[in-house]
Image (cartoon, rainbow, N blue to C red):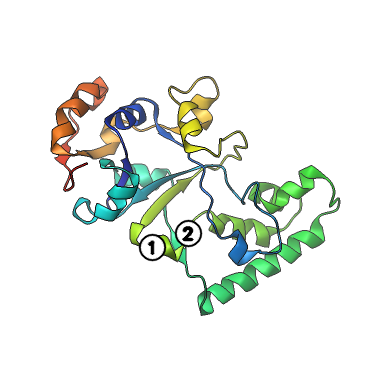
Amino acid sequence: MTLTHYTKTVEAVANILTHGFAWFPNRRKLAELFVPWHDFSKREPQQFGMISFTENTPACTKVYCDKFGYFGIIVSENWATQRRAQRVIYVDSDGPATEAWKNLFSLGYRDLQSRIEYPNDGGWLMSYENKVIASAIAGSTLWANLLQIWEYMEPASAAQEREWRITNSMPNYSLSESKSEAIQQVSPPRGWAKHTHVVPIQASEVEALIAPKSYIPQLQSLLPASFGDVTLVESEWAE
């Protein structure tokens, strides 16, 4: 298994290696498919941050790189396993499997709804979006497990990305919905952000770095000293 995180600039690579991967907000865009009767426009379930990788090999990432960037960090399988990286489940807009998912989410939603003792209380209402509260406070194990699966779902329109992801186990409500603002929170991370907003990686946990040939000297100059011996691979694609 080869997992690569792509980003847009040499500086972003250096920042990740120095401080860690930043948690990014990501709407799964599945709320209207699974629970169209509930308004998740302000916050979707488990929207506490994720870090994405592709299992596409460097030679098969043209479309992916055009979207996410030409600079890659290939992480070790051991690092990915320890961080509980999971292959994304791609969901079609219709079909028998999708109908089954809809039925399960409908059952889970009704189960949770029946268990909420104070429907006007903001704390109880967080059960709809937070699997921990759904299970520990409301007692709906079914909805909590469905939200766990939700974290690793994505519309089938993105299936060519062959994504794996790591999701934030902490309910980080302070995470900005803007990627640019999320980056600013960890450039560099300060205070609790050092523990809640980034996932560190060591040189021994990086299999290789990928960059267009013309950018490799600049990348070498910006790498933290401990990453000086990491293998550098020329990108198949030019920026």
- Give x and y (percent) for residue 110: 75, 65
- Give x and y (percent) for residue 52: 40, 47
> Split into 4 quadrants, where in the image is the N terminus?
bottom left
Residue at the image position 49 percent from the left and 56 percent from the top: 152
- Per the rendering, the mark at residue 172 is none
Closest to the observer, 181 or 50: 181
Residue at the image position 48 percent from the left and 40 percent from the top: 24
| Mark 1 residue type | Ala
Q: Is residue 26 left or right of residue 110?
A: left
Q: Count residues near mark 1 (Cα–Cα under 10 Å), then give few for <14, some for 14-19, many for 20+.
A: some
Residue at the image position 59 percent from the left and 66 percent from the top: 33
Q: Is residue 18 above or below residue 80?
A: above
Q: Is residue 207 left or right of residue 163?
A: left
Task: Name the N-terminal-most of marks 1 and 2.
Answer: 2
Please identify the quarter of the rendering in which residue 176 is found.
Answer: top right
Residue at the image position 52 percent from the left and 37 percent from the top: 178
Q: Is residue 93 above or below residue 155?
A: below
Circles 1 and 2 in contact, beta carbons < 8 Å: yes
Secondary element at tag 1:
helix
What residue would you read off at disc 1? 159
- Give x and y (percent) for residue 175: 56, 35
Q: Is residue 57 visible?
A: yes
Secondary element at tag 2:
strand
Q: How many marks?
A: 2
Q: Is residue 56 visible?
A: no
- Per the rendering, the mark at residue 154 is 2
- Give x and y (percent) for residue 119: 84, 52
Q: Is residue 208 above or below residue 131?
A: above
Q: Count residues near mark 2 (Cα–Cα under 10 Å), then give few for <14, some for 14-19, many for 20+.
A: some
Distance of mark 1 from mark 2, alpha carbons? 8 Å
| Mark 2 residue type | Glu
